[in-house]
Amino acid sequence: MSRIGKSPIAVLDGVKVSVDGQTVNVEGPKGKLSFTHQENISVSVSEDGKTLTVNRANDNRDSRAFHGLTRALINNMVVGVKNGYEKKLEIIGVGYLAAIKGKILQLRVGFANELQIPIPENLEVTCPDQTHVTVKGCDKQAVGQFAAYVRALRKPEPYKGKGVRYVGEQVKIKPGKSAT
C-alpha cells in the first residue's frame, strides 16, 4: 500500500470539500480548485467533514501509481486554497529589470527587445522592486509552471551568474579561460 496514499488528508478550517463522482471540488478563502481523478481511485469525505481518504480499487500498476499522486494533488489543493503558494525570483545583471504594466510582466534581460509575458488570470504577480518578481496563487502547479517559464527565458549563465533565478538558488560559477 502506498505510504503517501493511505494517509488521510486533514481538511483545514475555512475550507469546504465536496466530492461529486470523480470530481473533487475545494473552496477556501484564496479561491476555488477542482480535480478529476482516475476511475480506479475513489475519494471519500468523513462524516464530520474534517478528513479525506483516497483508496484504490485494485493493485494494478496504474492504480498504485495514481493512488499516492491523487492524494498529494488533493492535499496541495486544500493547502493552496487556505494558505496559497508563492515563488520568488530575482534578476541579476547590469541593466536587467522587471516591471508590471496591467496584466503583462515586462522583462529586460539582455535581449534586443523587451520581453512581454501575459500573466495568467489565476495568478498574482508583483514586483516589489525592479530586480525581484513574486508569483502567488492557490494552484501549486500554476505557480511553479509560471515561475519556471519566467526563469527559462534567461537562465543564469555559469560565468557571471547573470539571468533570472529563484531567490536562494545557488549557481555554480565556472572559472574563465584565464584560470588555467
Image (cartoon, helix red, strand yellow):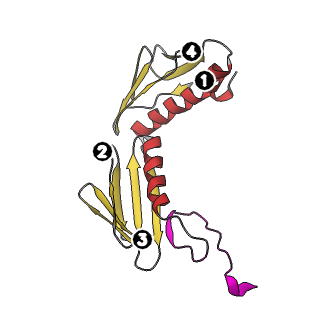
Q: Is residue 99 left or right of residue 174?
A: left
* Residue annotated with mark 3: 109
Distance from disc 2 to disc 4, alpha carbons, whole Å, reads 32 Å
Residue for point 40% across, 53% down:
135
Task: Please say whether residue 73 is one of the residues in the magenta stretch.
Answer: no
Residue for point 64% across, 29% down:
4
Mark 1 or 3, nearer chain start: 1
* Residue annotated with mark 1: 67
Circle 3: element type = loop
Distance from disc 1 to disc 2, alpha carbons, whole Å, reads 30 Å
Q: Is residue 69 left or right of residue 78?
A: right
* Residue annotated with mark 4: 40
Residue 84 in view in this figure? yes
Residue 98's x, y, as percent? 36, 67
Query: Residue placed farthest to the right in the image?
Result: 180
Distance from disc 4 to disc 3, alpha carbons, whole Å, reads 47 Å
Check disc 2 and give the amino acid type. Glu
Circle 1: element type = helix
Check disc 4 and give the amino acid type. Asn
Residue 163's x, y, as percent? 49, 69
Q: Main secondary structure of the magenta part?
A: loop
With respect to residue 37, does 164 lie above or below?
below
